[in-house]
Image: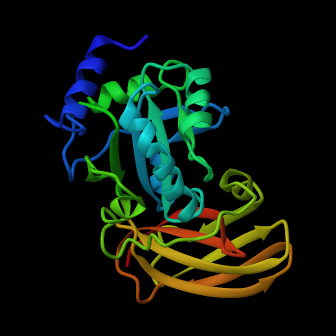
Amino acid sequence: MKKSLLVTLLLLLVGGISHAQIQAYSVGDVAPDFTVTDVNGNTYSLYSITGSGQYVLLDFFFTTCPPCQSTAPIFNELHEKYGCNQGQLFCMSVDVGDSDAEVVQFENTYGGTFSHAPAVSGTEGGGDAVNSTMNIAAYPTYALIGPDNKFISTDIWPIAGVADFEAAFPAGSGITPMTCSAVSVDQALSEATLQLYPNPAAQSTRLDLTLDTYGEVNIEVYDLLGQRVLVQELGALDAGLTATELDLSQVNNGIYVVRVAQNNQIIASRKLEVMK
């Protein structure tokens, strides 16, 4: 059951007196880690996602909120345009006050024809706790978090189209449109093994990659701001173990994310520290 506070906030929203934002945190603050489970039983942890170098766009909503209903298909259009969470952008909807069944009904009714982002219910998926921690003031709230776990935006609004979300992307983020793969990121990550050593590394590190299938492979290195600092194309590789040397001579000291893509799909990711 919705709390009367939510109804009050919704009326304020519709009336134009105020709009959504995160009250407990400001732009530049480090977002708190959380773990939630979506309506399909998949579990996600914020810091695991950002640790792979991705930006995270959160949609805080509840199912009977009219502005949430009207912007849900736009959010899912964004999710599909940028690779269904397989690229630099990870989209997730976090509900407050509703069950899995209610969130599924919401997605079926209002989510649109695009590939839907993971949706987490409030009562069963852990969304209530996240909404409480963030202290959401009104709904919907769209917030963008960077790979460094810092809030880039706590209030992306108004939303009339995908371009309004894109305007919040920071310069040099590397967030680019890509085709959704039929294979999920979680499945792909389970099909490849990546090891880096030494780690921390100085001038170079050895990359051992075990593939399950044949395909074109490239390596990209991102800093914690999501900026790509290095790319190395390995070409077409057979299934099995491949060892290659990653030249770090032009990479500054710091923490980075090494991502391996096969046929333009991310299949493995590891953190790397450069210390010279």
Q: Is residue 109 left or right of residue 95?
A: right
Q: Is residue 188 above or below residue 136?
A: below
Query: Dividing the image into 4 quarters, which one contains the N terminus?
Result: top left
Q: Residue, x 34% and y 39% (percent of image)? A: 32
**Viewer-nearest residue: 130 or 155:** 155
Colour treatment of the image: rainbow
- Which is more toward the observer, 81 or 161? 161
Left or right of 263 on screen, residue 201: left
Task: Find residue 250 and report its horizontal and vertical position in percent.
Answer: 41, 89
Q: Is residue 59 left or right of residue 138?
A: right
User: Which residue shows up at 54% across the image and 38% down it?
Assistant: 110
Residue at the image point whose x is 37% and y is 64% from the top: 163
Residue 194 at x, y percent in the picture: 67, 65
Residue ranking furthest to the front: 15
Image quarter where the C terminus lies is bottom left
Looking at the image, residue 159 lies above or below residue 213: above
Q: In the displayed structure, does residue 169 sit left or right of residue 239?
A: left
- Residue 242 appears at what percent x and percent y? 77, 78
In x, y percent, where is residue 29?
Answer: 22, 48
